[in-house]
Image: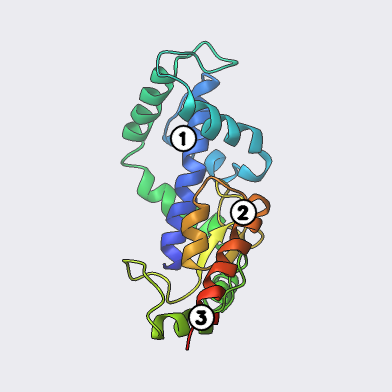
């Protein structure tokens, strides 16, 4: 989990919605759109994001996307074609996004603060409690995550930003995925924390 990797993930989130927006509105996608892309603000486009995540991905390929005369198949193929057409430009777009957008959205000091956090925003488990569970062989995950808090987006399909990011333990971050926002997930996080602490209570 590096600062650059989070920038790249955030870039992909913006790019997907940007291309989707252009295509369903019949607008051209070309290399001259860089400045427009850099100014494209996802925070004001939640209804469009919902259309992309909750309708585009969950409508049969031969059906039209509501409000358009385009089939899901055609939109999908147009997005792939746009990405191919922009392939040579995207490294520069990604670099420009990092320097002109991301460093202002999720500032380096905030990123460091999130990395060094010791308590999960959702279940409130601490790193010390996790280490105690590990020491007593009460953790059963099969990967190398979990030794530090991860960075989660409260609104999962928005970009990484100071306001949208919180520290999350591996278990909460893994369970939350991109399906739940922070408020929806809070009760689930609470249950995860209670379960992990029950294991602590049973230690000799």
What residue lies at 65% left-to-right and 57% top-to-bottom? 187
Counting every numbered tag in the picture gives: 3
Between disc 2 and disc 3, the foreground one is 3
Label 3, label 1: how far apart the Cα atoms are: 62 Å
Residue at mark 1: 32
What residue lies at 43% left-to-right and 47% top-to-bottom? 93
Within 10 Å of the Cα at label 3, are there few (<14), some (14-19), or many (20+) other Cα atoms? Answer: few
Within 10 Å of the Cα at label 1, are there few (<14), some (14-19), or many (20+) other Cα atoms? Answer: few
**Relative horizontal placement of residue 61, taking residue 56 as reference (left or right):** left
Label 2, label 3: how far apart the Cα atoms are: 26 Å
Q: Are marks 3 and 1 in contact (CB under 8 Å)?
A: no
Q: Closest to the observer: 144 or 27?
A: 144
Q: Closest to the observer: 24 or 32?
A: 24
What residue lies at 52% left-to-right and 22% top-to-bottom? 24
From this viewpoint, which residue is outermost toward the bottom? 204
Label 2, label 1: how far apart the Cα atoms are: 40 Å
Q: Closest to the observer: 65 or 100?
A: 65
Is residue 30 at all visible to an observer of this figure? yes
Residue at mark 2: 185
Q: Which of disc 3 and disc 2 is earlier in sequence?
A: 2
Task: For mark 3, give the secondary structure.
Answer: loop
Q: Where does the image place residue 175, in percent across and percent down from the top left?
A: 49, 55
Between disc 2 and disc 1, the foreground one is 2
Say if 36 sits above or below 65 in the image.
below
């Amino acid at each position: 989990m590096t600062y650059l990797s989070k920038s790249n993930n955030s870039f992909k989130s913006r790019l997907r919605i940007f291309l989707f927006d252009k295509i369903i509105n019949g607008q051209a996608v070309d290399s001259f759109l860089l400045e427009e892309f850099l100014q494209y603000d996802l925070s004001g486009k939640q209804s469009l994001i919902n259309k992309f995540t909750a309708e585009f991905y969950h409508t049969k390929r031969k059906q039209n996307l509501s409000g358009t005369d385009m089939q899901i198949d055609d939109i999908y193929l147009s997005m792939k074609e746009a990405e191919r057409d922009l392939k040579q430009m995207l490294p520069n777009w990604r670099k420009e996004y990092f320097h002109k957008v991301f460093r202002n959205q999720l500032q380096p000091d905030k990123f460091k603060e999130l990395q060094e956090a010791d308590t999960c925003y959702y279940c409130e488990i601490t790193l010390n409690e996790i280490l105690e569970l590990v020491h007593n062989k009460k953790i059963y995950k099969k990967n190398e995550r979990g030794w530090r808090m991860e960075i989660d987006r409260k609104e999962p399909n928005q970009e990484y930003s100071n306001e949208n990011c919180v520290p999350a333990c591996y278990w909460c971050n893994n369970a939350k995925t991109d399906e739940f926002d922070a408020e929806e997930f809070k009760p689930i996080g609470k249950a995860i924390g209670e379960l992990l602490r029950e294991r602590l209570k049973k230690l000799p």
